[in-house]
Amino acid sequence: MISNAVKEELRKIAGKDNFFDEIEERICYSYDGTTFKSKPDIVLKPANAQEVSHVLKVANREKIPVVPRGAGTGLSGGSVPIEGGIVLAMNRMKKILSIDEENLVAFVEPGVINEEFQKEVERRGLFYPPDPASQKMCTLGGNIAECAGGPHCLKYGVTRDYVLGLEAVLADGSIINTGGQVMKNVSGYDLTRLLIGSEGTLGVVTKIVLKLLPLPEDRRTILAAFSTMERAAETVSAIIASRLIPATLEFMDGVTVKVVEEFLKIGLPTTADALLLIEVDGKKEAVEIDYEKIMKICKDKGAVELKGARTSGERENLWKARRAVSAALGRICPLKLNEDVVVPRSKLPLLITKVKEICTEFGIKSANYGHAGDGNIHVNILIESRADDEMKKVEPALEKLYKEVVNLGGTISGEHGIGFLKSKYLALGAGVESVNVMRKIKDALDPNNILNPGKIFAVNPSSLSGEEKINSPRPSLTKRGDNSLSKGARKRVRGKE
Amino acid sequence: MNSFNLKKYKSEISKCVKCGTCTSICPVYRETLQESVSARGKMSLIEAFLEGEIGASSILDKRLRQCVQCTKCIEECPNGIPVDIILFSAWRALKEKLPTPLWKNFAFEKALSGAGIPAAAGFLYRNFGGLSAILPVEALKRKVSRRKPLKFKTTKLNSGKKIGFYPGCMIDSMYPEILSYVREIFARLGYEMIIPSRLVCCGLPQMSTGNVELARRNALVNMNAFKDAKVDVIITACATCLSTVRKKYPLLLEDTPALKVYEKFMDLSEFLAGEKGLENFPEAEGKFTYHDPCHLARELKIKEEPREIIKKISAGNFAEADSSELCCGFGGSFNFENYSLSMNICSHLVKALKDTGAETVITSCPACMWQIEDGISRSNSGMNVMHLAEFVLRGALNADTDKR
Ligand SMILES: Cc1cc2nc3c(=O)[nH]c(=O)nc-3n(C[C@H](O)[C@H](O)[C@H](O)COP(=O)(O)OP(=O)(O)OC[C@H]3O[C@@H](n4cnc5c(N)ncnc54)[C@H](O)[C@@H]3O)c2cc1C
Ligand code: SF4
Ligand code: SF4
């Protein structure tokens, strides 16, 4: 419980119009894209770094959890306040501060929506490649905190590769500036990269310096349908083996194609077992050559349907379809676990076979799609109900999937982060020794564990030591938080039944 | 009325996967950045209400009503959640627990549902400087431009063909001149316009206060009136009326199949786009742009027809605004209860319209006209707003004046 005096203090910092503690408002900041929910005690909408700093000072003094939130589209539960406390809604800080066209650098606040930023730079002939499928709604701050990726990342790299510097507020309220606006920087430890992907557990990002590229001169998009998943996977390998790196190389399985076609009705080939969505970009002549080469490879590998988008409208439709997949799966199943495992790309066919085997073994259904080109596949486990026995089937299946992925040389999260949904498996993905180092960093920067507690690490890092931390029980999906979460948290983290 | 029973929508509501797509396009969310006004937030609140976690509080009521009924969220939701019907049902459920304020009850339920009363109210409003003295609403202080119903001197062809017309409250009360334009267009094309007496409000304002029963009564009155008029086609010049009739009447009147008169309704633009006679209409001078009313473009997918007509009559002097996604922000009672928010939403639209360089904004909905006129006068951008019906006659009007 937060005392009235502290509430008053916080209300003063953010202003009464940006402070909410009514149950109705708290309900609306209790969830993210996972649909898991847990209500905060207070929602604050700060306007600048100073306000964030003041809030953190109070929270640190009072040991109140603080959970930064962008657009609440995360898929690992990152912005769900599982221990209650304060949700810091960062979306009011949404200014594009400046775009330096001479140095190809942009300065933005964290609440800027990814797509709005992309449009703004494109108007100037510039390009910001990271394009998560949620780009229409997610914030750049959320992208930094999760190190988001997207189709473009095959050729252009992930969010991390475009961040030059950050301004962030630490748990004690101090404001730091990391990196800068220069392309090269080895002045000490790379704190920028430490904050990227830290899921709001190390600091609250209040300003971002981003690197931009010139906008590619031309783009061409290909849609190729295959009768089996194996054929599609072989085609991917053949494209990469022929030394071609398209801008995107996305794949969708039969289930996902049917679901989005039902939503958008744009004439996708619904009888195919697998679709590839390939885009090449660059100089006009080079694009033409790559396009022909890829068309030929697809034909040779037995594509049953093959077409190029002729107009920008057609291209936009294909991408709209691809971006709608994740959410549209709600049509067949309201609860799904959207996994984002990643393996070395040559192992992709093997991973797909393994997924099929696991589903058969545990009697569960899945829908798969994702970034075939970089080996990052979204395995969506479709859960018919939140009944305990259904969830019980899912947990061992997931564990087996993660183990297989690690055996293949991959890891458990390529895009969505660990949040609280995968915290139990962190050591599996990162290795015990690395997790120990991570915990030390967390302890040093946030000794009271107020910043997004319960995320990445399942238990309060300062309360345990060494090996014990790694092997200690993690919150389980079945019981949603029964083991290591506090009593309050246990009550809060409950999905809809 | 089963279609508006909130409990029935439990499973539809649970289809919300919280993806947030609706936050990217909701005009009210984008202006307020308040999660509870987005469709995702509204669905969560309704779910909590149904589960008994929250009661019929005033905050719940306020948040659920902060909606301009643009239906964008329905168009964009990957899971096809019928947000509009769910909201009508929720407003209905809340009405049982929270009384409707008296002024709203008077303005949106009583007055609009009696034949002839909107016209009288409109007359008062237009002629005596606003009802703001009686009703506690900032929005009523605005000025609506008055254009006198015009007299035309054309020789009318009369082929003996009859066409039904449904004016709706906004035309009836605020813009009666539109009625005379439509009558003139029909006359020039050789049709006689039939407006049955006894018509009442389409029912949307009543549904929005939660009085679905009254909306149904209005639907029955209107459908019966047209049934007796025996016409093959019924035209409207109000996007909102048309979307209500086409999309909501089937639900309101589900047990009265004999009254499927709503199937005969069409928008003026749909009708005119197919009329050969339009080629004889003189061209209008000036540069034009068009605003898509949400209820026409999004809900009924009528986008091409008005453009076809405008391009024909403006000699191609038409500029598309970068506003196809923007909403005027009116939303009926939303505007009255959230006036400044509503005008902020409108300001983005006005800017986009102005950026086209057009002098005249054409639209197909009197409610949008009302709002955009207000928005323009606040931004001093000097554009003028015109209903499609007036535009169609623009060239002819000038020709008439020249002859005089
Ligand atoms: C339909 C759909 C498609 C998606 N597709 C992709 C995809 O293709 N690729 C991909 O990578 N992800 C994808 N995601 C996941 C999600 O959109 C990303 O993780 C995104 O980066 C989250 O941004 P957000 O603004 O919604 O952040 P939130 O969900 O609000 O927060 C995410 C995390 O960031 C932290 N955070 C937010 N803002 C700040 C800040 N200013 N400072 C510090 N920490 C902060 C939060 O505490 C939380 O831990 C998808 C999600 C959905 C619903
Ligand atoms: S778009 Fe639909 S499914 Fe997604 S959050 Fe909004 S209402 Fe829910
Ligand atoms: S109808 Fe429009 S205003 Fe209402 S919730 Fe949906 S998007 Fe928002």
Image (cartoon, coloured by chain):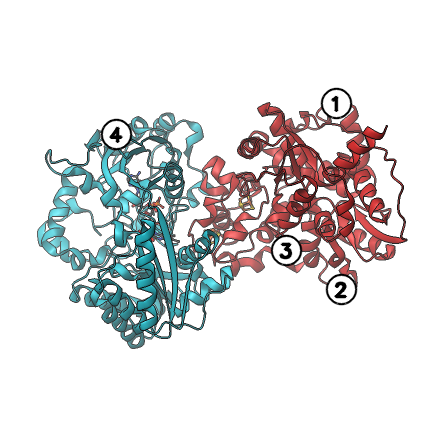
Q: Chain of mark 3?
A: B
How far apart are the two marked residues, 4 and 3, measured between alpha carbons? 49 Å
Chain letter of the residue carrying label 4: A
Alpha carbons under labels 2 and 3: distance apart? 18 Å
Label 2 amino acid? Pro
Q: Amino acid at mark 3?
A: Phe
- Of pointers 2 and 3, the one earlier in the residue sequence: 3
Q: Which residue is mark 2?
A: B257
Res. A128 in view: yes
- Chain assignment, label 1: B
Which quarter of the picture shows residue A408? bottom left
- At a point 79% along the width and 42% down the height, the residue shown is B182
**Nearer to me, B358 or A142:** B358
Question: Which of B328 and A117 lies nearest the eye of the viewer?
Answer: A117
Which label was assigned to residue A57? Answer: 4
On the same chain, marks 1 and 4? The answer is no
Marks 1 and 3, the one that precedes in the sequence:
3
Counting residues from the start of the chain, the first of labels 1 and 2 encountered is 1
Depth check: give the residue in front, B395 or A157: B395
Q: Which chain is in cyan here?
A: A
- Dot in front, 1 or 3: 1
Q: Is residue B234 left or right of residue A47?
A: right
Q: What amino acid is labelled 1 in the image?
A: Gly
**Tag 1 and tag 3 share a subunit:** yes
Q: Is residue A262 above or below residue A134?
A: below
**Numbered disc 2: what chain?**
B
Residues at badges 2 and 4 in contact (C-beta under 8 Å)? no
* Label 1 lies in ligand 3 vicinity (Cβ under 8 Å): no
